[in-house]
Image (cartoon, rainbow, N blue to C red):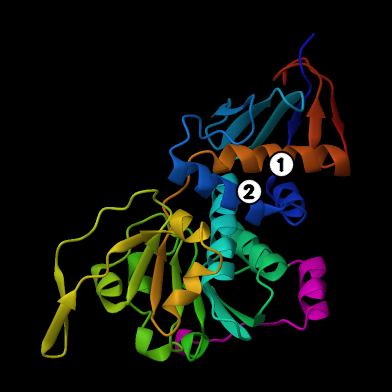
Amino acid sequence: MGYATVEIDERDCLVAFGDADLVALASEALRRSVLGAESPDLRRGSRLTPAERPDRVMLQDERVGGVCVLPRTVLRSLAVAALTALAARELLAARVATATVIGTGAPVAGLLTALVNHVVNLGEVALWPGEGEQGWPTPKLAAHAAERGLMLSRPVELDRALLGTDLVVLAPGVDEAVHRQVDLGMLARGAVVVNATGHAPTEELTRAVGRVITDVPRPVAVAETVRVGRASRPAPEPVALGELLRRPRAGWEFAGESVLVDLQGVPGLEVALASRLYEIALVRGLGVVRHGLLGPEGGQQCALN
C-alpha cells in the first residue's frame, strides 16, 4: 500500500508559510552548519528528490508518513525568506526601522510574509518591483500588517524607496543592474543590505559596506584593501551568521556600520521547511491529494480544500 501524495501549489505554500515558525527553522539550520553536523537534515527521515516535473520537488517524509510535491523555485525562495527574517531580526538596531524589498512575484510574497510576521520593530515596508509587476500582499497579510501598525507602500521611484531606509532586501531574481542602483549613501546610518538573489553581490557593494556577513559556515576572507578617499583599509572579512547566533544579539555590535548579508543557502533548511509546510498543509487541508504513491495516471484525485 503506497503513501498518499499531496501536491501543494504556490498559493498553498505561501498560506502554510504564514503559519510556519520559520525563524526557528533557519536558526537551527545555521547552528547545525556551524557545528559541522554530519547530517544537515533537520527532520530525520525526510528527504527531497526530483519530481516527475522539472519545476517540482518531492518530499518523502517518513516521520509524518507520506509524500508531498512542491514547486522547486517557491521552496527555495521561502528558505531565503526565512534566513532574511532571521538576519533582519538579529542585525537591525533596536529602534523602529523601515525596509525596502526589491523584486517581483512569489519570492517577494514570501519575504514580505516573513518580515511582517517575524521582525517586530519594522514600521514601514516599501515594495519596488524593478522592471516587472509586483503582486500586492494578500488581504490577510495586509490586515495583519495593519494590526501591527506596519505601513506598506509602493513608491514609484527606487530613490524614494531607498532614501533613509534601514533594511534593503534584494529578492531572488533581481539582476546585477539593480544591485548597482543601491547607493549606500542614500540609506540610513548602519543600514543592512540582504543579498538574497542567489548571485554573488557586486564588487562595488561589497567594497562599500563596513561588514560582510554570510550564511556560509566558514567564510573565506578576501585578502585585499578597500580605498576610502585617499586612505585605504582592509576589506571587511566575512563573518558567519551562524557564529553570531551563538552570542545573543551579537549583531548589534555592528551598530552604526553598514552591513551586507550575502545568503548562499544553508544545507538542510529546504527539507526542514518542506516538511513543516507539509505538516501545516495536512492540518489545514491545503493542496490536492492523490491516492497511491505518485500515481497520477490511475490514482483518484480529490481536493482537500
Instruction: Say whether marks 1 and 2 touch (CB < 8 Å).
Output: yes
Q: Nearer the viewer, residue 146 or 209?
A: 209
Q: Identify the mark at residue 82; answer none if there is no mark.
A: none
| Pair 1/2: label in front | 2
Over which residues does the magenta segment extend?
138-159
Q: For this view, does 305 lie left or right of residue 49?
A: right
Report the residue at 21% width, 70% height from top.
235
Front in this rendered view, residue 172 or 241: 241
Q: Amino acid at mark 1?
A: Arg
Residue under the point 87% across and 40% down: 283
Q: Residue at x 11, y 90 (%)?
A: 230
Work out which residue is located at the far left of the displayed protein and give it: 230
Point out residue 70 in the picture as x, y percentages from the top left corner: 65, 38
Residue receiving disc 1: 276
From this viewpoint, which residue is outermost toward the top? 1
- Find numbered disc 2 in the image and state the secondary structure of the residue it sits on: helix
> Observer-nearest residue: 99 or 304?
99
Q: Position of residue 174 (x, y in %)?
A: 43, 64
Q: Is residue 21 visible?
A: yes
Q: Is residue 287 magenta?
A: no
Query: What amino acid type should be assigned to the residue bearing mark 2?
Result: Leu
Q: Is residue 72 visible?
A: no
Residue closest to the eye, 262 or 77: 262
- In which quadrant will I find the N terminus? top right
Disc on the earlier residue, 1 or 2: 2
- The residue under label 2 is 25
- The residue at 46%/89% (across/down) is 188
Q: Is residue 143 above or below residue 270?
A: below
